[in-house]
Each structure stands twice: as C-alpha cells, then as structure tokens.
Image (cartoon, rainbow, N blue to C red):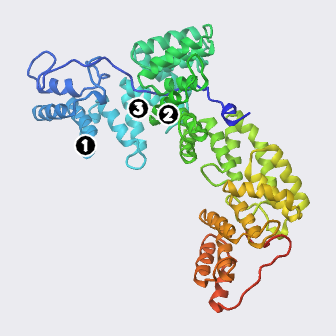
C-alpha cells in the first residue's frame, strides 16, 4: 500500500471557528443615519458598527464590508461631535485598526472597554493576543469581558480557546456552554459547533437528528460550515442513508462560499472520483484555496499533491513546508507525512531518528500510517547503525567508520531493512557498503550506481572512490570528480575531503595545493576534523605526495 492510499484523509468533523455571515447592511448616505436624520453618531454607527452589537443586529458590518474612507470620515466627525461616546471611540478605533493605525486605536479601545463597551473589549483583546506585540493575559481578561456581555464573536472565540486549550486549560464543557449561548442568539458559528457536538456525542448524548437540524440552521444563518456538517452526515450515513452525491452537493455549496472545510472535503471527492468525475487539478485548486486560509487538513492534503505531482509539478520542498504547517496545527496524519519525508530524504536530508519521532507522535494521535512505519524505521535504523556512515546527513550518533564495519552483521541488518522498505535507495546504499566490506563487489556495484544516479551522497562518494581507483570498474577520474563535486555541493564533508585529496595528489587533475586547501577547509568547516591534518600537511610542504590506501576496496577513508 502506497503512502497516498495509506494516509488517512477523511477527517471531516474537526471543529473550526469561522466568522459568521450576516445580512447585507442598509445603504446610508454619508453623514446621515438610517432614518435620514443628520446625526453624526448614527452616521458613524451605520458605517462602522458591528452586527453583533445591541441595536445593530442584522445591519452592522463585518470587517471586510466596511467602506474605510467613508467610515473614517464619518467617525472622526462623530468623535468631534460626541468626544465622550464609548460607542464612537469603539467604532473609530475599529476603523483605525483596519487601516493600520493601531497606536491611535488602542487608547480609544481601552477607554471604551473600561466603559463597558463589548465591541471595544473584543477588538482590544484581538490586538493584545499576539504574544510578541501584545499581552495575552490581558487579552484573555478582555475576551471574557466581551463574552460575559454576550458579544457573539467573543463567545465563539473563547469557546474555541477552551476547546483547544489555547491560553486556558482545555474545558470542552465550557466550550459547549459558550457555543450554546452563541447559538441561542441565532449565530451560525455557534449553531454549527453545537451541531458538531451532537454529531460526535461530545458533552451531549449523540443525536444525528439534532445535528442535522442545527447544521441546517447554521447554513440558514449564513454560516457555510453548516454545509460541511450536512455533507459529513450524508457521507458517513449518520442519521440518514449514506449518499455521496448529496454529500458532494452540500460540500459544493460550502466550497462556493470559500469555506475551507467544505473545500477540503470536496477536494477529496475529486481526488478519489467519489460522486464526481475524478480530477486532480480540481482537487488541487480547492485545496490550494483552503490551505491559503491556513486550514491544517487542507495543508496536509495539499502536501501530498505536491509530493506525488497530482494536479501540479512535484515539489518536495513545498510539500514539506505544507506538511510541517499542518503538523504544527496538530493534524495527526501530517505527522506521518513529515516522518515519511524525513525517512526517505524528500525535501530534506534523510534523518531516520527524526522520522521516528514524527511517526511515534502520529501513532500516539491515532494515525495508522505512522504506526505501521515505526517498526520499519527501527529496522532501518539498525541497518544504519551497522552500515551507515557517521558523516552522512542524519548520521550523527549513527553509523560506523568503514574500517570498523562488521560485514556479516551489517549485511543481515540491511537485508532486513531492504525487505521492510524495498523502495528505499538509502537502505540499499548501506547494504552495498556492507557488501563492499565483505568484498562482494558484484552485488554492491549496481546498488551504488543506482544510489549515485539518484543523488545519494554516500553512494556518490563511495562509487567515485571506486571509479577513481579503478576498483571493480574501469577507472574514470573525470566521472569520479563529477560525483565528488555533486556530493560536495550538498555540503557533504567527505566529498569535500576527497576533492582536497584529488587536488593535492593530482589524481585525474593537475595538482593544485590552493584548490586542495580550499576543499579541506570546507570539509573542516562541515565537521570533518581530520581535514585539519591535511591542511597542516599542505602548510608544511607542497612537495610530498601521499599514495592512496588501496587496502580492501577503494580508499577506506571518511568517504566510506
């Protein structure tokens, strides 16, 4: 089973707070209120009030709906007319925050929050939440203040914090209580999360019928997450007969509003050809939009598209960045993706010890792919310990010098590793190194050649040593030097050391002490301490020529 099939993708019931969608605001004339009276305060409110403030339900504005230039002019005029109004201070400060004038906004928000204005308390809490520029402790006090006043966004934000244990001790019961308060006010986000609780039986008795009603109410209130909830019920056959076509239609309705959970679920349908025509490009498009909204599950799924070239070109570095972003959001199967990439050296240097850590974390979180990879990785680490080089990427604390390698033990360990992971280039290179020590060149050479062609630095340098010395193959100094340089470009110290030796000895090139010293210095800078002796030797004399040690097969130096 391949990684794409093995990693679990269909985790759709994840709580995700999203800003509610409200009715379109009334159109007002700049400088006048909704009744046409010439009231500066009312004019400011009409252009900058929140839809969750008392008296502004259904006609206030979300951040992205505010006409900033008009709101700024109206609210600056209102402040001159009513300098002591907490409402005006909160509204003008809200506009200032949106146009980047935080320094001027913060004092007004403090004054208004101290006067009991819930919008101001909430907006100031948002400003102070950043641990680098704000005061998270004070932000939490203000968030609680706004929630106590019944301000819906504060209820939802505080609930999400209790749900995730973000800045507070995790408390699912308190989170549910807060979401219920928001739902009682008709808020779509609160309705969705209450429905999710009934769907999963979290804090309440599981009831798919109630979940269905709450998801429908959430969608009706303008919360597109409601469509994600409805889609999941039909996809999983919870309270209804399983119907992927209906699920796809609900996901499509959510995706049309740019809701990332719906986009991610629909992307999976396109990827697998479930109730829609299979299309990697469409799946990639949906996941890209959802990932750009910082949705962890979309980032993990998109990482696989980049890793396997599904709907896009292969880009292992981009895949790793996305998988790491998802992993930081505690997406369990992202642990398996990151572990796999470290285990195979995709988008990063191969590092089995680091891979094992990710697999163990993923397994503890319930990821089955990670669980299966633990035994495989331990088997590979046993091979690395017996036959790997301590100088290769991820080799710190592992591997042995070629002279100390026990061929019989290493061959057995690496044959087990290759059996556990037949596609691993690195495991085969380690096996080849053990076979070299056993003087079984005919078996080792094909694996080394393949490893070198695929960019494995240990294989490149080991095979280059054989080419340079004509051991088991026809001598080809030019190709040997090309392979050394390819590995040296990857900051592989033994390759840099080998190039120093080549230029010091004049092996296949004209002797050049300056070049030799340059390569030895790079090897030393990358942690190969024995290069210092070569630098000292070059400093003492440039005349002496040391012959290659041909004991065994090739040079039994750090390259091996």
Quadrant housing the C terminus? bottom right
Q: Position of residue 167 (x, y in %)?
A: 49, 39
Residue 295 disc label = 2
82 horizontally vs 404: left or right = left
Residue at 60% of width from left, 41% of height from top?
Answer: 307
Label 3 to label 1: alpha-carbon separation: 19 Å
Could you tell me which residue is drawn at 54 percent across and 11 percent down? 246
Report the residue marked by disc 3.
144
Whether 149 is drawn above or below 540: the answer is above
Task: Give the quadrant of residue 320.
Answer: top right
Mark 2 vs mark 3, foreground winner is 2
Near mark 1 (Cα within 10 A), the count class, few <14, some 14-19 or many ≥20, is: some
Rendering coords of residue 334 (x, y %)? 61, 38
Q: Quadrant of residue 402?
A: bottom right
Q: Decide: marks 2, 3 in contact (CB < 8 A)?
A: no
Residue wearing tag 1: 107
**In the structure shown, which secondary structural element does the residue marked by tag 2 occupy?**
loop
**Most distant residue in the right direction:** 408
Res 366 seen here = no
Q: Is residue 105 left or right of residue 157?
A: left
Return the disc, 2 or 1, that comes first in the chain's sequence. Answer: 1
In what element is the residue under mark 3? helix
Q: Position of residue 540 (x, y in %)?
A: 65, 92
Q: Is residue 185 above or below residue 279?
A: above
Q: Residues within 10 Å of mark 3 (few under 14, many from 20)?
A: many
Residue drawn at point x = 62 percent, y = 63 percent: 486
Q: Pointer 2 and pointer 1: residues touching (CB < 8 Å)? A: no
């Amino acid at each position: 089973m391949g990684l794409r099939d093995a990693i679990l993708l269909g985790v759709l019931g994840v709580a995700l707070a999203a800003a509610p969608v409200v009715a379109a605001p009334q159109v007002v004339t700049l400088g006048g209120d909704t009744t046409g009276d010439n009231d500066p305060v009312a004019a400011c409110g009409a252009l900058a009030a929140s839809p969750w403030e008392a008296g502004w339900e259904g006609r206030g504005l979300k951040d992205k709906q505010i006409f900033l230039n008009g709101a700024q002019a109206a609210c600056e005029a209102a402040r001159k007319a009513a300098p002591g109004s907490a409402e005006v201070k909160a509204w003008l400060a809200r506009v200032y925050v949106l146009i980047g004038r935080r320094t001027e906004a913060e004092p007004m928000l403090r004054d208004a929050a101290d006067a009991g204005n819930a919008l101001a308390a909430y907006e100031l809490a948002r400003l102070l939440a950043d641990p680098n520029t704000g005061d998270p402790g004070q932000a939490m006090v203000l968030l609680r203040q706004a929630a106590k006043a019944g301000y819906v966004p504060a209820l939802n934000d505080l609930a999400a914090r209790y749900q995730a244990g973000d800045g507070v001790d995790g408390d699912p019961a308190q989170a549910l209580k807060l979401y219920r308060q928001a739902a009682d006010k008709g808020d779509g986000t609160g309705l969705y999360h209450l429905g999710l609780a009934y769907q999963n039986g979290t804090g309440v008795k599981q009831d798919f019928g109630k979940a269905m009603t709450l998801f429908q109410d959430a969608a009706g209130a303008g919360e597109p997450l409601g469509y994600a909830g409805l889609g999941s019920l039909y996809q999983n056959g919870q309270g209804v007969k399983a119907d992927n076509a209906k699920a796809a239609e609900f996901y499509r309705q959510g995706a049309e509003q740019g809701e990332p959970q719906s986009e991610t679920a629909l992307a999976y349908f396109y990827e697998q050809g479930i109730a829609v025509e299979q299309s990697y490009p469409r799946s990639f498009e949906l996941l890209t939009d959802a990932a750009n909204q910082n949705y962890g599950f979309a980032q993990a799924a998109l990482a696989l598209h980049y890793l396997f070239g599904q709907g896009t070109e292969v880009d292992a570095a981009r895949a790793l960045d996305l998988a790491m972003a998802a992993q930081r959001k505690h997406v369990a199967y992202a642990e398996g993706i990151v572990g796999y990439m470290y285990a195979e050296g995709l988008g990063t240097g191969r590092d089995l010890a680091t891979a094992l850590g990710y697999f163990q974390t993923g397994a503890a979180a319930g990821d089955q792919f990670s669980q299966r990879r633990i035994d495989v990785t331990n088997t590979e680490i046993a091979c690395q310990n017996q036959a790997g080089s301590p100088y290769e990427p991820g080799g710190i604390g592992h591997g042995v010098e070629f002279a100390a390698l026990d061929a019989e033990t290493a061959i057995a360990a690496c044959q087990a590793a290759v059996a556990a992971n037949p596609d691993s280039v690195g495991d085969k290179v380690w096996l080849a190194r053990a076979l070299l020590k056993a003087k079984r060149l005919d078996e080792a050479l094909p694996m080394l050649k393949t490893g070198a062609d695929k960019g494995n630095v240990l294989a490149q340098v080991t095979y280059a040593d054989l080419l340079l010395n004509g051991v088991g193959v026809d001598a080809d100094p030019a190709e040997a030097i090309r392979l050394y340089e390819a590995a040296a470009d990857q900051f592989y110290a033994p390759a840099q050391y080998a190039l120093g030796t080549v230029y010091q000895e004049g092996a296949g090139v004209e002797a050049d002490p300056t070049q030799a010293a340059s390569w030895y210095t790079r090897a030393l800078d990358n942690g190969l301490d024995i290069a210092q002796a070569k630098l000292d030797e070059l400093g003492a004399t440039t005349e002496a020529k040391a012959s290659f040690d041909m004991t065994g097969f090739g040079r039994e130096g750090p390259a091996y």
